[in-house]
Image (spheres, rainbow, N blue to C red):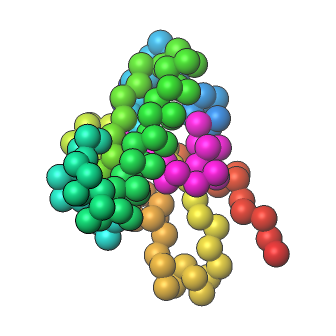
Amino acid sequence: MFRSVLIAIDGTPRSLGILDTVKRFCDTEQHLLHVLLAVDSAYALEEFDQRLSRFDQTEYPAAAQEQLHADKIVQEAIQAFTQAGFSTTGSQEVGEPAEVIIKVAKARNSDLVVMGHRHLSRLKRMLDPSIASKVIDEAGCPVLVDARHQPPRH
């Protein structure tokens, strides 16, 4: 039985579908959830603190904004799961998403990772490898990939 579940979100509207998937597959009394959002290191402050000084926000506005947005997304996901009756924690980590998800899954001894899928074409997949594939190969636990929420095709 899965007890510790890591939920990797990216902040896109599609990642909200993961919340529904977790609610369908996990039991509020048996599962401990941890919501994770990886922040690209190009947009990360070395030592992020929500109480950033005006200097830091002025000096690195894109990084400060990215991390404040990431924190908001994680808090909203925690709130949604908590309201649904789950015991939930959350964090944001800096780094390449697949590496961060794998690192956190192992550090937390996760029994299951739940994440989304980007639905890239074969060409785009060659240029930008699948995060889900790497996590599946290296997480050391089962990975549930929610591929239901496809972007609209143009």
Q: Is residue 74 magenta?
A: no
User: Residue 109: x and y, percent?
Assistant: 26, 37
Count of numbered marks: 0
The C terminus, quarter of image: bottom right
Outermost residue, left direction?
47
Which residue is found at the position 22% from the left and 57% from the top?
Answer: 55
- Name the residue nearer the viewer: 63 or 100: 63
Q: Quadrant of residue 26?
A: top right
Q: Is residue 142 above or below residue 27?
A: below
Q: Quadrant of residue 107?
A: top left
Which residue is found at the position 41% from the left and 25% from the top?
Answer: 88
| Residue extent of the magenta highlight | 5-19
- Is 47 left, or right, of 72 in this rendering? left
Which residue is found at the position 65% from the left and 43% from the top?
Answer: 17
- Is 107 left, or right, of 4 in this rendering? left
Q: Quadrant of residue 12?
A: bottom right
Q: Is residue 30 above or below residue 74?
A: above
Q: Is residue 23 above or below residue 134?
A: above
User: Residue 76: x and y, percent?
Assistant: 51, 34
- Name the residue nearer the viewer: 32 or 43: 43
Q: Is residue 42 above or below residue 20?
A: below
- Name the residue nearer the viewer: 76 or 103: 76
Res. 76 in view: yes
Res. 95 in view: no
User: Residue 89: x and y, percent?
Assistant: 36, 29
Outermost residue, right direction?
154
- Is 20 left, or right, of 49 in this rendering? right
The N terminus, quarter of image: top left
Which residue is found at the position 22% from the left and 48% from the top?
Answer: 53
Q: Is residue 7 magenta?
A: yes
